[in-house]
Image (cartoon, helix red, strand yellow):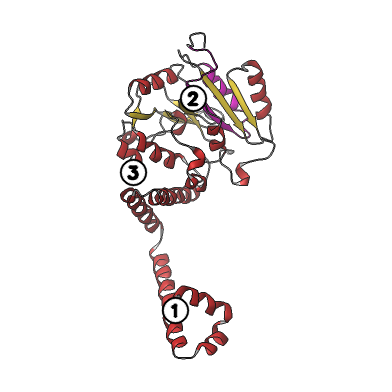
């Protein structure tokens, strides 16, 4: 920090850290931020989502020690349970030209990380984001695996790779240009895990850089993790949810080719997840529904509407009328 140019009033980078009940881990995250050796100022933004342990107290202690660098928002009511997105709240606090992401249970290990990534982005305007590798650890700090990324994704990514979801960057390693207005994209608020959506959106502004030379960050898997310890079925469901809303976004803004690609991807994954029995069951339900609608239409035209009401009930007939239209 002694090498910063321009003081602390105009941070070049905003580090966004969201946390909830991370008492055993939050100090690792904060120390990973504070060890960064840069020639530019950065700010550390911490959003605590009404933790019930000592997380907020630890955050306040660090803030008192680094009052010009650390900015906090400690909620008194849990925002996630109200359907709000803590990461978007934290990003709205950011004033930096670049955003760096790391949740309170993960941490960085390389003191040169920010300097390398930001210097690259400053000198390469055609790139919008950069990232690097990370390893898995458990709640006790024991290493589970050496990498969270497959070899396929340890490469630079074109703009199209990002937009169409053909690239992956570990979220806690990402530094990117602050170009996404959180409140301007309503579809982002419909998604449980917004990493895929954010990466796709960023692709509209440039390419992605993968840094082999940066030491891996630590991604922690523990019982309190919102995402890491979710059952695979829930993760797959959330992935389908993300892909659907990405499709809806691109459809709304008129990028039809991209929208179609995401819709096709969503449909393929949804079909793969369905068993043959369920497919037949769902197709059968549709056929029966269509037959009922056809029979109703014929019956109503033939003057048997009164009998239909007696058979189906008034509310069902009204629903069918709505489907059929005038």
The residue under label 2 is: 96
Specify the farthest residue to the top. Answer: 2
Q: Position of residue 65 (x, y in %)?
A: 64, 16
Q: Which residues are magenta?
A: 6-35
Residue 250 showing in the rendered view? yes
Q: Position of residue 317 (x, y in %)?
A: 53, 80
Q: CA distance from mark 2 to mark 3?
A: 27 Å
Nearest to N terminus: mark 2 or mark 3? 2
In terms of sequence position, does the residue under pointer 1 or pointer 2 come before the other? 2
Above or below, comparing residue 77 to residue 291 in the picture: above
Q: Is residue 190 above or below residue 66?
A: below
Q: In the rendered image, which quarter contains the C terminus?
A: bottom left
Answer with left or right where residue 67 lies relative to residue 307.
right
Image position, residue 283 (x, y; %): 39, 70
User: Please, is residue 157 above or below residue 254 in the view?
Assistant: above
Q: CA distance from mark 1 to mark 2?
A: 57 Å
The structure residue drawn at horizontal position 57% and vertical position 19%, both measured from the top left corner, is 69
Query: What element does badge 2 sit on?
Result: loop
């Amino acid at each position: 920090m002694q090498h910063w140019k321009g003081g602390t009033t105009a941070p070049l980078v905003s580090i966004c850290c969201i946390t909830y009940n991370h008492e055993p881990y939050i100090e690792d995250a904060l120390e990973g931020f504070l060890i960064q050796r840069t020639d530019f100022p950065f700010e550390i933004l911490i959003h605590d989502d009404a933790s019930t342990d000592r997380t907020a107290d630890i955050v306040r202690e660090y803030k008192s020690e680094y009052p010009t660098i650390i900015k906090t928002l400690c909620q008194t009511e849990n925002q996630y349970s109200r359907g709000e997105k803590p990461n978007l709240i934290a990003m709205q606090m950011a004033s930096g030209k670049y955003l760096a992401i790391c949740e309170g249970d993960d941490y960085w290990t390389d003191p040169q990380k920010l300097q390398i990534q930001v210097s690259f982005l400053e000198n390469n305007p055609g790139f919008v984001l950069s990232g690097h590798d990370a390893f898995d650890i458990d709640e006790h700090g024991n290493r589970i695996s050496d990498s969270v990324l497959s070899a396929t994704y340890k490469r630079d990514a074109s703009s199209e790779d990002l937009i169409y979801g053909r690239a992956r960057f570990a979220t806690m390693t990402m530094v990117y240009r602050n170009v996404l207005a959180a409140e301007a994209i309503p579809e982002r608020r419909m998604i449980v895990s917004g990493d895929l959506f954010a990466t796709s959106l960023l692709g509209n502004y440039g390419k992605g850089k993968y840094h082999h030379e940066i030491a891996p960050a630590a991604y922690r898997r523990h019982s309190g993790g919102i995402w890491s310890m979710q059952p695979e079925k829930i993760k797959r469901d959330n992935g389908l949810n993300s892909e659907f809303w990405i499709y809806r976004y691109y459809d709304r803004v008129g990028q039809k080719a991209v929208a179609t690609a995401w819709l096709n991807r969503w449909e393929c994954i949804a079909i793969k997840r369905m068993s043959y029995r369920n497919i037949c069951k769902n197709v059968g339900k549709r056929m029966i529904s269509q037959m009922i609608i056809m029979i109703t239409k014929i019956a109503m035209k033939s003057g048997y509407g009164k009998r239909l009401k007696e058979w189906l009930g008034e509310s069902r007939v009204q629903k069918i009328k709505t489907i059929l239209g005038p």
